[in-house]
Image (cartoon, helix red, strand yellow):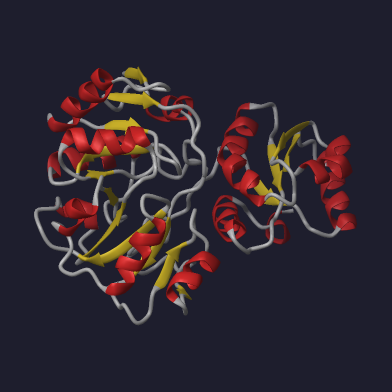
Amino acid sequence: MTTMKTNNWQPEEIREAAEALKAGEVVAFPTETVYGLGADATNETAVRKIFEAKGRPNDNPLIIHVSNVTQMKQFVSSLPEEAEKVIAHFWPGSCTIVLNKKGPLAPSVTGGLDTVGIRMPDHSVALNLIEATGVPLAAPSANSSGRPSPTTAHHVHDDLDGKIRGIIDGGPTGVGLESTVLDLTDPEKPTILRPGGVSYEELTEVLGTVYIDTHLKDKTHAPKSPGMKYRHYSPDIPVYILPEDKAAAEDVLSKLHTQGETIGLLVSVELNEQFGHMADVVFSLGEREIPQQAASRLYDGLRELDRSPATVILAEAYSPEGIGLAYMNRLEKAAEWLDRSL
């Protein structure tokens, strides 16, 4: 598997990756959220290679990434005013919009639905790669299905070495969590299907009333967005959410030590000061008052602690406001609940 170094990207490196994509191969590339595993979104054979490499369920739809609005319009049946507002305020950026589809998209992209999720990433490598390829790229996160999403090229290599054509190494990602997915198929009821890099609060400032999908935890219906149906973001060792009550947290840590567990803590600087002495390994989420730091470090922390001697991970909960909503959405999908497991 080729790793194409593009921390200071060069045109020939983008061309190499674009030629591979045009030939029906899959290539991992950086975005501002996480690394994506890209394939020509109009080529069914190529798109199926994404599912094969990731071990991804076939009914889990993919987001397509475009380099401009004109390109997007080829694949949606209409562009409501609400979508235009989102595009004006948040593109390029971490907001995917779901609209009714049209055009020559590969059937596997939409998971059998009549809708498609589209976004324009806010990353120069991603935008130049899409432009050079000349077609939108279907691109879920570039990890094995169910694993924590990759925020570095090294993470991609750990999961997909030997399974894909190559990796464009653009350095660590910025946001660290996947995009917000906003369903605009009913323009009068904009609905968040997956919280992400653009917050609920930011969307309400632009659109007014915004809903949060009630099926986020429903495992039975056909998902309209990635991340809605299947377990995600999990390392190989168990993850638990650390109780917010100090006495309860100390009790959990003591019980796990008694059971012979090697404890990995995924916590803020402040909680490390309280509980770090009771853990064997600590990965910092940054300052408690800056939840953006926790969001950007969550997946890296889960992976690092998974590679450490730890046999269990205890992760800090954050308030579900702003980016904290997306952080908790991912953590709750990765974690097991203490009251059922200890």
Q: Residue at x 81, y 46 (%)?
A: 271
Q: Residue at x 80, y 36 (%)?
A: 260
Q: Position of residue 37 (x, y in %)?
A: 32, 37
**In this figure, what is the number of numbered marks?**
0
Q: Is residue 184 above or below residue 40?
A: below
Q: Residue at x 56, y 40 (%)?
A: 299
**Which residue is farthest bottom?**
188
Q: Position of residue 249 (x, y in %)?
A: 83, 52
Q: Position of residue 173 (x, y in %)?
A: 49, 36
Q: Is residue 213 above or below residue 31?
A: below
Task: Judge from the rendering whether residue 276 lies leftward or rightward of residue 29; answer left or right.
Answer: right
Q: Position of residue 5 (x, y in %)?
A: 38, 18
Residue 38 appears in which quarter of the rendering? top left
Q: Residue at x 82, y 40 (%)?
A: 272
**Which residue is farthest left?**
104
Query: Viewer-proximal residue, 108 or 183?
Result: 183
Query: Viewer-proximal residue, 115 or 250?
Result: 115
Query: Is residue 310 visible from the viewing direction of this image?
Result: yes
Residue 328 appears in which quarter of the rendering? bottom right
Query: Is residue 24 visible from the viewing direction of this image?
Result: no
Task: Judge from the rendering whether residue 61 lies leftward or rightward of residue 279; answer left or right.
Answer: left
Quadrant location of the N terminus? top left
Task: Judge from the rendering whether residue 243 lies leftward or rightward of residue 313; answer left or right.
Answer: right
Q: Is residue 199 above or below residue 259?
A: below
